[in-house]
Image (spheres, rainbow, N blue to C red):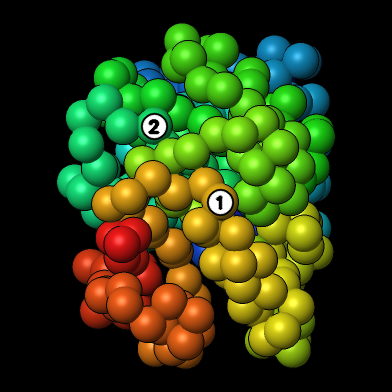
Amino acid sequence: MASFKDKLTEAIQLAKNKGFEQSRAEWLMLDLFGWSRTDYLMHMYDEMNEAEEAKFSLAVERMLLGEPIQYIVGFQMFYGLQFQVNAHCLIPRPETEEVMLHFLEHVKEEATVVDIGTGSGALAVSLKKLNPKLNVVATDVVQETLDLAKDNAYHHNADIEFLHGDALKPLIKNNIKVDGLISNPPYIDYEEVHSMADTVVKYEPHVALFAKNKGYAIYESILNDLPKVLNEDAYVTFEIGYNQGEILKELILKKYPNLSVNVIKDINGIDRIVSFEWK
């Protein structure tokens, strides 16, 4: 039988042949077996048993086709917490952690907040874990995605109210008013699909990536119904695409000219957040 090191060396070469980074194969082995780098060094010369070899070989095949490692291993880390992910949800990105922390700084300790388009539930669950006094509601338009978010909340013992439906409709239907709204909605223009990585376009759910009206359709839907769901002084935070800040700000001010709207850059100096306090 081959050792873990032998199989990793083989996987690295196969990855390079396909134009992937060496780190992709290393990441796959560590996450697949639940190891740290230290764990790997301790086990690298151990022989794989038949089940381990079959498991890794199948995972490598999927990796070489371009499938994201997170879908292959079934999880992604977000702000130090592990979340189950699958093809029904967008893979949580590190940039969204900044969006969450900004929002958390601006909502009251015992506020009722909603995460619109929760996906894996990473935002909603992390908010609840960081501030257990928050009353957190989360929505998604895809039932399978909502079921995954529920599983993640259960795993992290996070008490969250999950509602199925599009944009703010579930809140309106249930007469829920909130003190804070956060959303990382689909915001990519369909015309940008040809400039995106194949691993994203081929495997991640398009319903969570793309929006009509050049990427602004979901924002507009949310904006239209804000008066029906926001309490006075509620704080609203949107994650945005790199080139959407000023345009979204204009859309908001056209509809609600009395608001003070902020466009905020992320750690890399890229526009990432649009936020405002509801008046």
Tell me the residue at 61%/34% (across/down): 175
User: Going 76% across and 15% down the picture, which residue do you hit?
Assistant: 51
**For the residue marked with disc 1, what is the amino acid?**
Lys
Residue 273's quadrant in the figure?
bottom left
| Residue 240 appearing in the image | yes
Residue that mark 2 sits on: 112
User: Seen in the image, is 135 located left or right of residue 208?
Assistant: left
Which x, y percent locates residue 38?
31, 26
Q: Are marks 1 and 2 in contact (CB under 8 Å)?
A: no
* Label 1 environment density (alpha carbons within 10 Å; few <14, some 14–19, many ≥20): some
Q: Is residue 253 above or below residue 55?
A: below
Residue 53 position, x and y percent, is 73, 25
CA gap, disc 1 and disc 2: 15 Å
Secondary structure under the numbered disc 2 in the rendered image: strand
Q: Quadrant of residue 109?
A: top left
N-term mark: 1 or 2: 2
- The crowding category of the residue bearing disc 2, from other C-alpha atoms within 10 Å (few below 14, some 14 to 19, many at least 20), is many
Disc tally is: 2
Residue 32: % across, % down: 59, 29
Residue 45 seen in this snapshot? no
Give the SS element for disc 1.
Answer: helix
Residue of label 1: 228
Q: Is 273 left, or right, of 50 in this rendering?
A: left
In the image, is 25 to the left or to the right of 106?
A: right
Q: Nearer the viewer, residue 12 or 47?
A: 12
Which quadrant: the N terminus?
top right
Q: Residue at x 38, y 57 (%)?
A: 236
Task: Identify which amino acid the numbered label 2 is placed on.
Answer: Thr
Q: Position of residue 154 (x, y in %)?
A: 56, 12
Q: Nearer the viewer, residue 201 or 30?
A: 201
